[in-house]
Image (cartoon, grey):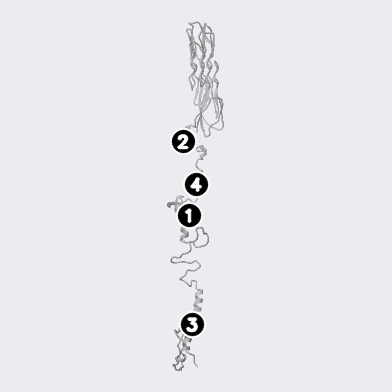
Amino acid sequence: MANLPETPQWEEGIYQIEVSDPVLGGPDGISNRQGKQLASRTLYLKQQVEKGGSELAKHIAAADPHTQYAPKASPTFTGTPTAPTPANSDNSKKLATTEFVAKALAALAGSAPETLDTLKELADALGNDPNFATTVLNKLAEKLAKDQHGADIPDPALFVKNLGLGDGSYVGRLIGSPKVFKSSGTYTPTKGTKYAIAEVQGAGGGGGNATGNTTTSAFGTSGGAGAYALSFFAITSGTASIVVGAGGVPSGNGGTSSFSGFNNTIIAAGGNGGTNNIGSGGMTSNVHARGSDGGTASGGTIINGKGGAGGASFILSGTPSSGIGGDSHFSGGAFGAGAQGGAGRNAILGAGGSGATVFMANTTYNGGSGGDGIVIIWEYA
């Protein structure tokens, strides 16, 4: 007995044996048609399953069995893949979408101008200097300190020259008003002072006294002025001692003024006091006398000036007249006393006082006092 022949194919339908069908055996007999169709289906299915098994193993073993999909490891996407956009503050391992990157870049640029909103533009603006911060700090260290007010300029003379204010060999700007000493004291330089000019004026001498009687006229000669010195010097550390001379009392010498400090000793002596009681008798007598000398100075680097001498005094035909006191650098001498007799007049600022006069009277008049000295300091940066 033989087996039905099987063909591995899918049969679309299974034949239904009809009542009228005769019983007919053999490979193509109607009685075997259903079995043959079912056997063919079974063989077909068996081959498909076997084929599927080997294909599945091959599929599993393949490195990229689904070429239409990207692999999990190092995928390469095509087309226009999308993904959820993480929050701006997200720093996890989620995918960064173009939207996320755009927002991050916009936040980074902020409100920067268009010419400075890229790293390239920022690098160009910084001169492509990888050590920009150090470079800036080094440049700032070269700047002058604001609280030094120019005192930290390495070469002041060259600085003045570069400003077109000269060749740099002279003193710079005046600092404020001069410091005036009308009494003795201590000079302390103003901060920033580099050089100074000192004016030292000695005191004036007092005019002479005059005593007469009913038959004699008399006069006192006028006092001389104090000396004047002018000095220019550099300011170093420390202070200077200032002495201001007092004006001479009637017939007395004026006091000496001085400046001592910063390698300078400047002395301006006071003027000499006038002579007392030069007179003559009677209405026709004549007498003449010169005024006293002014003081002398030393130590000034620019000027050492002698004080002016007092003017001449005289009696002409018994009528007295005293001379004007000696002129100082700062003031003219005091005017003389009148012809009818009187006290001498006081002077100011180192000038000499005038002498007194008496016109045939039994009385005494005092000469005028000399002017006090003065010291003036001009400060320069």
Residue depth check, mark 2 versus mark 1: number of the one nearer the observer: 1
SS state under label 2: helix
SS state under label 4: helix
Residue at the spot of label 1: 108
Q: Residue at x 46, y 60 (%)?
A: 99
Q: Residues within 10 Å of mark 3 (few under 14, many from 20)?
A: some
Residue at the spot of label 4: 136
Which numbered disc flags the more N-terminal residue, 3 or 1? 3
- Asked if the residues shown at circle 3 and circle 4 are in contact, with their CB atoms under 8 angstroms apart, the answer is no
Residue at the spot of label 2: 160
Residue at the spot of label 3: 45
> Which x, y percent locates residue 175?
49, 32
Which numbered disc flags the more N-terminal residue, 2 or 4? 4
SS state under label 1: helix
- Asked if the residues shown at circle 3 and circle 2 are in contact, with their CB atoms under 8 angstroms apart, the answer is no
Query: What mark, if any, has residue 65 been given in the picture?
Result: none
> Which x, y percent locates residue 295?
52, 19
**CA–CA distance between discs 2 and 4?**
27 Å
Q: Residues within 10 Å of mark 2 (few under 14, many from 20)?
A: some
Name the residue type under label 4: Val
**CA–CA distance between discs 3 and 1?**
65 Å
Q: Residue at x 47, y 57 (%)?
A: 103
**CA–CA distance between discs 2 and 1?**
48 Å
- Asked if the residues shown at circle 2 and circle 1 are in contact, with their CB atoms under 8 angstroms apart, the answer is no
